Image: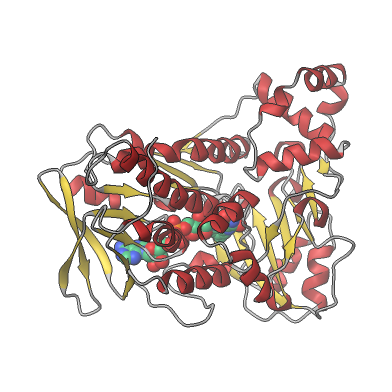
Amino acid sequence: MAQVTPRSGHFGQLVIIGGSIGGSSLAGAVAAWFDRVVIVERDSFEDRPAKRKGVPHAYHFHTLTPLGLRVLEDIFPLLTKEMRELGAPFVDPIKMVRQGTKAGFLPRRDSELRLLRATRPLLEWYLHKRTSAVPNVEYRTGLEAVGLIEESGRIVGVRTRDPRDAISAVPADFVVDASGRGSRAPRWLAELGYPAPEETVVNAHWGYATTYVKVPSEWEPGDYGSISVAPKVDKGAGPAASRGASLWRNENDLVVVTAQGNRRDYPPRDLEGMMEFVSSFGYDEFRGVLEAFQAVSPVEIWRSTANRRRKFSAVPRHLEGFAAMGDSVAAMNPVYGHGMTLAFVAAQKFREAVVAHIASGGTGVLGLGQRFQQSLEPTIDAAWALSTASDFRVPGVEVNGKPYTYEPTEQSEYMDRVLALATEDADLALKYMETALLMRGPEWSRDEDLRAKVKADWDRLGSVAREP
Ligand SMILES: Cc1cc2nc3c(=O)[nH]c(=O)nc-3n(C[C@H](O)[C@H](O)[C@H](O)COP(=O)(O)OP(=O)(O)OC[C@H]3O[C@@H](n4cnc5c(N)ncnc54)[C@H](O)[C@@H]3O)c2cc1C
């Protein structure tokens, strides 16, 4: 492949719809290849990490997988250093997180994996600050995208509305939709006569309640840095089957406490109710922290948690010069913590698609959108398989609005036993977590020795469940 170096002028003007983590990371990744990058964002930004209307979910517990961190560091090489200077803890998740699975707690050990524990507003503020410093990137805030403009099968702009309801157009050679879970891109495509992507929704009706406490700087919850207990789902009964919680230290000695419940067993919005919820499934740690320290912000709840996937890569007729990324393409159930990683992987993949496109003689943007869209699918497949395999087991789960009945398969029975064995074997636990954190595929679980070990202990492993 020919050597390709970035130079503006390859592709003219890129317009990104949505200036959150996905849009900002994309602009940071590809600005060098475009004359100009315009980010159309309906919100405005403060010059400090802050809540904003367009991303209400940012208040809740956000963890970035080591894959997400690695990809982001590729785009913003100073990220970890600068975020640590801003106070974000940088920890080994295998050693420092007490991870309660439905089969039991995973053994902890040293690992090479690292997590950056920043709040989502801090991470987003950092990406915005870094990207807005790039000379050919412009954020146009207070501007809402309301449609796409097409000419002869190619995108030529984005229709926008300002706060006074005035409609205008932002010209574009390429448009990426990064407007999140509520994206209207399928409707905009349909308005232009293009097929909307096929959509699949798997909803196990999870809900969140989140608050933050401030702890003394020397405080640690134990010999671990955080604790996360998942619902036992099919391995338990009563509150333990549907309820879980996590607590986790972020920057500025803030500890986030999040309660999670599935099958519509939603955690309540008030602190007293949240305390009852988090102490109802057998652990004192969560309530203990909420009682010992002052909550510095209110309890907020969140219930839009379905896995929603749109197959933009498979539409029978593609609008040239248009693509989608982040939650607009695959909004995952947040409890598995993959959404931001998919957005950052998309930014990196777009850059790779640009390089490959130029190297293969591609001129202009023809074919670039499809090349990019298809390159996203393997990572989405991996995250989708993990999230849905878990959510399919939750009673009351729905697929595209219809009840879904879970039938165990040989593979699912086997993987349950691998997890049970992982609670007794630190090496296996590491592999299990590396897969859950998207650092490796599940190939290791097909190893013949492991298979033989599980088969030899089938009945016992099948009955292993976390206590209580
Ligand atoms: C409760 C909860 C907890 C989560 N926890 C985690 C976690 O632990 N780890 C993890 O990796 N992920 C987590 N996620 C997922 C993560 O938040 C998303 O994957 C991520 O925000 C996707 O980024 P995005 O840039 O695609 O979209 P968003 O962050 O949703 O941003 C969309 C942007 O587009 C703007 N916008 C929308 N429409 C328009 C328009 N028409 N015109 C102009 N601008 C527009 C919005 O204002 C916003 O700025 C969680 C999600 C939720 C709901």
Instruction: Look at the image and tell me whether residue 329 can be seen.
Output: no
Q: Residue 222: x, y in percent?
A: 89, 64
Q: Residue 423: x, y in percent?
A: 84, 39
Q: Residue 345: x, y in percent?
A: 50, 48
Q: Residue at x 67, y 81 (%)?
A: 296
Colouring chosen for the image of the structure: secondary structure
Q: Residue at x 68, y 71 (%)?
A: 84
Image-quadrant location for residue 442? top right
- Left or right: where does residue 191 sit relative to residue 183? left
Q: Residue at x 56, y 35 (%)?
A: 385
- Left or right: where does residue 207 sit relative to residue 44? right
**Nearer-the-camera pick, 348 or 215:** 348
Instruction: Look at the image and tell me whether residue 287 can be seen.
Output: yes
User: Which quarter of the rendered picture does the N terminus lie within?
Assistant: top left
Q: Residue at x 64, y 67 (%)?
A: 118
Residue 140 vertical position relative to residue 156 in the rendered view, above or below: below
**Nearer-the-camera pick, 174 or 59:** 174
